[in-house]
Amino acid sequence: MKTQSASLFQADLVKEALGASITKLNPKIMFRNPVMFTVELGTIVMLLVTIYSLSHNDQGTFAYNLTVFLVLFVTLLFANFAEAIAEARGKAQADSLRKTREETPAKVIRTVGEMYLNEVQIISSARLRKGDVFICEAGDTIPTDGEIIEGLATIDESAITGESAPVIREAGGDKSSVTGGTKVLSDKIKVEVTTQPGESFLDKMIALVEGASRQKTPNEIALTILLAGFTLIFVIVCVTLKPFADYANTPITIAAFISLFVCLIPTTIGGLLSAIGIAGMDRALRANVITKSGKAVETAGDIDVLLLDKTGTITIGNRKATHFHAAKKVDHQAFINAITLSSLSDETPEGKSIIELVKTSENIDLTIDSQQISLKNTKNTSSYSIQDLHFIKFTAETRSSGIDMPDGRRIRKGAFDAMRNLTERAGNTFPQDISEAVKRISSNGGTPLVVTENEVVLGVIELQDIIKPGIQERFERLRKMGVKTVMVTGDNPLTAKYIAEKSGVDDFIAEAKPEDKMNYIKAEQATGKLVAMMGDGTNDAPALAQADVGVAMNSGTQAAKEAGNMVDLDNDPTKLIEIVEIGKQLLMTRGTLTTFSIANDVAKYFAIVPALFIASIPSLQGLNIMKLHSPESAILSAVIFNAIIIPALIPLALKGVDYKPIGASALLRRNLLIYGLGGVLIPFVGIKVIDLAVSLFF
Amino acid sequence: MNTEILGIVLSFALTVALAIPLGKYIAKVYAGKPTSLDPIFNPVEKLFFRLSGINPTQEMTWKQHLVALLTINLLWFFWAMFILMNQGWLPWNPDGNPSMSPDLAFNTAISFLVNCNLQHYSGESGMSYLGQISCLMFLQFVTAGTGMAACAVVFNAMKERTTDKLGNFYDYFIKSCTRVLLPLSFLVALIIMFQGTPMNVEGKASFISMQGDTVQVSRGPAAALIGIKQIGTNGGGYFGVNSAHPLENPTYLTNIVEVGSIIIIPIAMVFALGFYLQRKRLSWMIFGVMTLGFILFLLPTVYLEMQGNPAISQMGIGQHLGSMEGKEIRFGSAASAFWAITTTVTSNGSVNAMHDSLTPLSGMFAMLGMMINSLYGGVGVGFLNFYIFVIIAVFISGLMVGRTPEFLGKKIEAREMKIATIVALLHTLLILAGTAIASYVFVRNPSIGWLNNPQFHGFSEMLYEYTSSSANNGSGFEGLGDNTPFWNISTGIVMILSRFLPIIGPIAIAGILANKKFIPESAGTLKTDTSTFGLMVFAVILIVAALSFFPSLALGPIAEYFSMK
């Protein structure tokens, strides 16, 4: 992952946001936020009152009115600034990703009718259209997002993921996508452009952050309704206060009315609400996840079930060979030799790990040049000419691979049942001790690979999954959040069960076919649960679309990326866990700041209500429990507190409230204590302190 | 312990102890299980249903429930208007009381239709026996039954399943009347009758007092009406001064029975919910929140009333019995304070002492009880109001724990929040807007003669009147001259809005939620039957009330309190 700047407020971003806070004063934009829109109306009225008070003195002094006006104006700017800085940060983050795909030359192949011509034109990447095909060779920067249609290449994706190790992308498989801005290190690929310019996921995300296409999420809408309700209550309270005051023979200035109103309505949460939503998407982007909608982030917080692929998520990469078990009556050395030979051409990680283990634990010296392969062990050396060797590739039908030797030996290795069929069809018996070894390996979570020579079993290779360190703790954390984890694996049930138990997942799907995932998701959804999954292949696309949160790996196929609602640039399967936490934080930040905002009103009442009536009803001095200096200073202190609490809480809005998986009730208690009780008490202190300063002037 | 306080503690404990089995019984009634009263009432009900062509097993959607509820209420309104405006010439009027003026009839008809029982007339001189029985007592039964039936619909909707079929309204309604209200009020009527409350159709009796004056004593079918008045949180007394009248509430024993009758069904409904849904913890949470609020208002009120009135102390008059202005010596200050809070937290509104004479802060607590209107609350409707606060609390606390809010396995979304917000807003709007208009009119016509008291107390009188109307409570700060077209019509409008919208709202929310997919609980789900969540609901209730009403209370009772010190 990229290194992130620790500072929330970088100078250039702040500058940009300050400019935006002015332009956002446009009432048309403000109207989207009912709470702050009413503050804007109040500010306009105060401007008129301030002008009026230049020539009249029945509405209080000019200086007092001007101060109230300025404080209200600043309140508006603060709220706009919160939104603007969140946008600026999101944009900056997206821009840094987009920078990698500046104008680069593209070697495009033009088609004539249905035919590709070999003629290669060099054009600017900006002119590439969906469906164009271009070529990239070693050293080229890939001009735009696309899918490899021919060839294989190693690619340096560090520009996006920050991971320096090169990755292999090839046509036809589940890792066929390339991203604009990444660099081809070796080989040559033909790539088809999959998106129109300006319509890539990143472009869509930037549009979301910028607000043009930002839609309120369902929870945000519901909360806005509640906040509008509170605002209306205070409209009622303030409007009816006028006849009440007339009854009590108390003249109340317009400044006092507007101050009371602005203090009471939930400006804190109203001002920070959109910033919180943007910051949620921004945090996802910082985790290198592109979200296609704000709703997806929010939904992530509600996830009940997480489907996780075993490989790469729960276990490190691929299985590794850990032991060789020779059959009875088979010479160990001959067995090792056969293993080595059969794995020579095996490019799979498992195959490589076998060679690795042979070299390290069996002291075999293997030298390969373009002509010859020589195998040297403690006793003797044997050499083979490569031309004479016939490598047998793995196929889905035989489920085995191997080598045919010049001396006629046929060495094969493969899955247990495939190899048993092979030996039994040849009339040989499958040795009892190897059957037992196979069973033992499986039940220990390993994968057995049986090795035969001329259809006679030599022994079995034990491959083991390595469970990622720390994964148990993460699952424990998820369990406390109320999220059920499900491991999806192609392994047999015995192996799957072992790994499931060892890693601490709640459930597993063994021998999983793509439709199994789909069925599992549907079954969970039918009981009302929300399911998240991660996938990369075209096979995964339907399940990604069905899941409530579908995270596609950036390396995955275009179909998978289209089907999901998030794309993970790091291709990191554990990312789902982070996404769930980001979603929860988003909701929590809204909830706690709403509570805080409303709780603040208690202290504000105690500041303003006595101030309003103290002149005509001296006995109400009893309510002035903060012993504020004068009615003017009390009202000013309350509005000033109301204004500065907004910028004071911007860091919290942007970073989000910490999520602690301590159970819902405990979390509620904790947040009620901090933001509820804190929200009641803090303004008493804050307003008193401000009053001490303000009382020097008013 | 002080005997007076012991009396309160015992009557409260006794009521709760009786409410729990009653709740179990009510749950059985609504679940359609057999009860011991079936042999008596099943044939009666069958007859009703056959005559009216209603099929009580046909289940209704929430909208159909509301149509049924509103239609039947509209019919009752016309019936009540007819009787009240014509009772003067209709039979059973031995004292020759007159028919009501149109605006008073409007106010009275609405007042009894909405279970409020605000009385701008006095029973002795304003009602015929026919009117008392066929109009007022009839409405006291059916409106309480309406509230309970509405509550039963919401109970049904809270079950763990997805459906739009929520039982039959008429079935719930009839059963509420026959299985709960009728037997209980019969029992209460019987007890107070034996204690001396009249139950006859004879005209005024007269006797010659020791001073030699001829005194006319009103009589009539009082005991029956008083039974349902207390049991159905109606509160509209037979006699003008309500349960302070020696014939309406003759002894300390009847006082215990009557005050217990006020809260027994509201409390029993809460327990009925737990038995009905098999969620007893939820019931205890709700009961706990309601009781906490109740006690929070009760304790200072009892203390203040027993302390006496500082203005009287300053005159050098000893007040070892507490503040006795407007109170009956046979009940004492503590029991009167207990009644005052009990009758205002529920929407009952019957009184055994004059609330106008409560010390300022006690008056405030009485008003706060009505402003919240869901600490026990009216029969059925109290829980409905509480339900709205639960929805709001679930929403905020759901967000606070990082999950889309859900209540009993149903997600709370924008539509439900809109309804809940409107209902929560309405009460504030009606009380404050009503008082504001009255203040506005009064300031411009100071000689209008509404207020018996100047200044803060006068303001409290107006605030109390609208609070009482909007809470469908019906008690009054009697210093107000309220039988004028202005008060009759304005409080009439307030009463009707504040009755039906808070019934429509919760039924709509519950109906919409019932139709949503049920989500089973997980470790991340916020449990709503815990004390933590109860505290949250309590905080929401208190904060909403405080924020809405602090300025108006500051100008009324709080200002009065500080100026008396």
Image: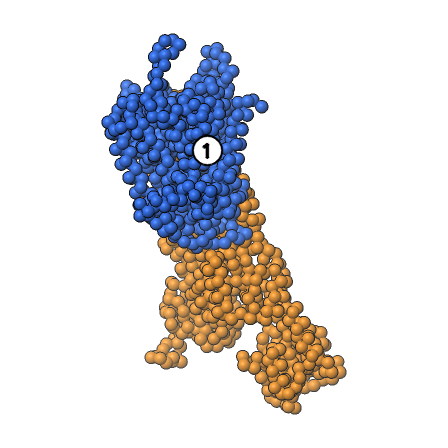
Chain colours: A orange, B blue
Between residue A387 and residue B393, name the one nearer to us.
B393
**Residue A402 appears in the figure:** no
- The residue at 62%/87% (across/down) is A426
**Badge 1: chain ID:** B
Residue A186 x, y percent position in the rendering = 52, 74
What type is the residue that disc 1 sits on?
A: Ile
Q: Label 1 neighbourhood size at 10 Å, few (<14), some (14-19), many (20+)?
A: many
**Residue A132 appears in the figure:** yes
Residue B210 x, y percent position in the rendering = 40, 9
Residue B537 x, y percent position in the rendering = 48, 40
Residue B534 x, y percent position in the rendering = 51, 40
Between residue B3 and residue A437, name the one nearer to us.
B3
Q: Is residue B379 left or right of residue B450?
A: right
- Relative height, residue A444 to residue A96 (above, below): below
Residue B72 falls in image quadrant: top left
Residue B326 falls in image quadrant: top left
Which residue is farthest right?
A379
Which residue is farthest bottom?
A407
Count of labels in the image: 1
Q: Which residue is mark 1?
A: B263
Q: Secondary structure at mark 1?
A: helix
- The residue at 59%/87% (across/down) is A390
- The residue at 43%/68% (across/down) is A559
**The N terminus of chain A appears in which quarter of the rendering?**
bottom right
- The residue at 33%/47% (across/down) is B50
**The C terminus of chain A appears in which quarter of the rendering?**
top left
Q: Is residue A57 left or right of residue A142?
A: left
Q: Is residue A326 left or right of residue B4?
A: right
- Relative height, residue B519 to residue A257 (above, below): below
